[in-house]
Amino acid sequence: MTIRPVHVVGGGLAGSEAAWQIAQAGVPVVLHEMRPVRGTDAHQTDRLAELVCSNSFRADDWAGNAVGLLHAEMRRAGSIIMAAGDEHQVPAGGALAVDREGFAQAVTERLEAHPLVTIVREEVAGLPPAEWDSVILSTGPLTSPALTEAILELTGEGQLSFFDAIAPIVHLESIDMDVAWRQSRYDKEGPGGDAAAYINCPMTKAQYDGFIDALLAGPKSEFKDWEHVPYFDGCLPIEVMAERGRETLRHGPMKPVGLTNAHNPQEKPWAVVQLRQDNALGTLWNMVGFQTKLKHGAQTEIFRTIPGLEKAVFARLGGLHRNTFINSPRLLDGTLRLKVEPRIRFAGQVTGVEGYVESAAVGLLAGRFAAAERLGRPLQAPPATTAMGALVGHITGGHLDAGAGSFQPMNINYGLLPPIAPPKRDEDGRRLGAKEKTRLKKRLVGERALADIEAWLAGAPVLEAAE
């Protein structure tokens, strides 16, 4: 019996993951990507799964961090995104960061080589044709205007957008290492075993105050048609953070804790700017947390006041673009189908998750849901005790108030998973301290999640079809 294809619109992380999962289940898939026929405000290539902001997939510790737990679950589910990320990782302390070019190339080549994947380079303007009876819309934060308008009309929503910003990238050779030094916060080793994965630029109080003044006074890029769009707190431009209080940055991306100036160990920095390796060669470094909407001329002038970056050469300056997401709790069912038109599923950031890994995870689930449905063996979402199940639960019903303007993008976090009460004493009867209880609770949540995701995967009809 011929199996009709599933159509996936959008070749970002979520769409690429969805297409991979569908094809691995033995179901044909057509992946529609509008680049290079139509470009976007942020993409620079036509590769699938191109990273347009940070190159970090964040913490990779399944026992102590919720996003690390999501990494582990996705690896168990055969994620193409995690496999390519692991293959092309670069040093980043306790985080999993990737060489963005090698990563995107690997995803593109694997999908192009899959016999059940057809890649079509075209824009899907408006709603997909009616003859596409199974569609996943994974157009993410850069959904084309025509498709955005069609979704608005279909759903009756008034707004689908919020701001997002990208950080500058600096050439390593232009960083003054007589001022800056290599160190990960608290000397923590990452997946690659490097405890000195970041470049740190120290600031005195006077330098920090001058930097804040310059940020606040610097000319910003403004977009009148976006002026009523809210920012997502997880990706705020640094000047917006500075507007919330002069100390905000010093307690955020510029916090000096866990670091010792190798050039002057006795002097405690008032603030620290960190840079993270952005490519495998180690020649490009991303300014951590420095998303910005400053105009380009102001960026070079202001960022070169940072000690160690006085002669910085920028491979890419920061910028602002629009993100798009739907009111998922009101519009989607438990398997990510649009209630008013069930042939259409949504995946990725457009559903109201935030972050590369979260977007890919929702793509993974949407792909499995669609493939299982095609095979006539519908699949339920993973248990709420898993990171993937918790994400789906949040965006499709866990958000208590789905009224206008109340639903906002969410990263994976322990608050989305059912808690576990840790024991008060260890095996020797010693009373556990508060920090020990917190660490143990996270580990227990992780152990439960991994056991439950293994059970869910073992019972998934998609896996049976792939054998």
Image (spheres, grey):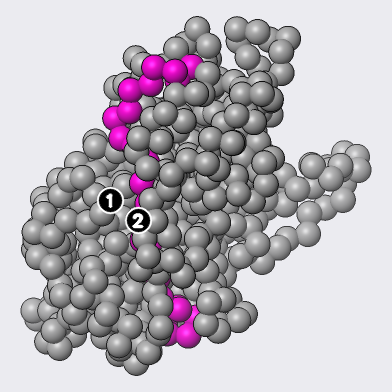
Can residue 448 be seen here? The reply is yes
Q: Is residue 327 magenta?
A: yes
Q: Residues within 10 Å of mark 1 (few under 14, many from 20)?
A: some
Q: How many numbered callouts?
A: 2
Q: Quadrant of the C terminus?
A: bottom left
Q: Which residue is mark 1?
A: 42
Residue range of the region highlighted in magenta in the rendering: 308-332
Rendered residue at 38%/51% (across/down): 221
Secondary structure beneath dot 1 equals loop
Rendered residue at 56%/25% (across/down): 184
Q: Quadrant of the N terminus?
A: bottom left
Q: Is residue 231 left or right of residue 367?
A: right
Task: Return the disc, 1 or 2, that comes first in the chain's sequence.
Answer: 1
Along the line of sight, which residue is nearer the eye, 165 or 367? 165
Give the x, y percent position of residue 223. 36, 60
Q: Are marks 1 and 2 in contact (CB under 8 Å)?
A: yes
Q: Which mark, by number, is residue 321?
A: 2
Which amino acid does the dot numbered 2 rest on? His
Rendered residue at 68%/10% (across/down): 265
Among the 4 quarters of the image, the one containing residue 360: bottom left
Q: Residue furthest bottom?
A: 340
**Looking at the picture, does residue 234 appear above or below residue 183?**
below
Give the x, y percent position of residue 357. 42, 53
Which amino acid does the dot numbered 1 rest on? Ala
**Cα distance, mark 1 to mark 2?**
7 Å
Give the x, y percent position of residue 80. 29, 51
Q: Residues within 10 Å of mark 2 (few under 14, many from 20)?
A: some
Among the 4 quarters of the image, the one containing residue 208: top right
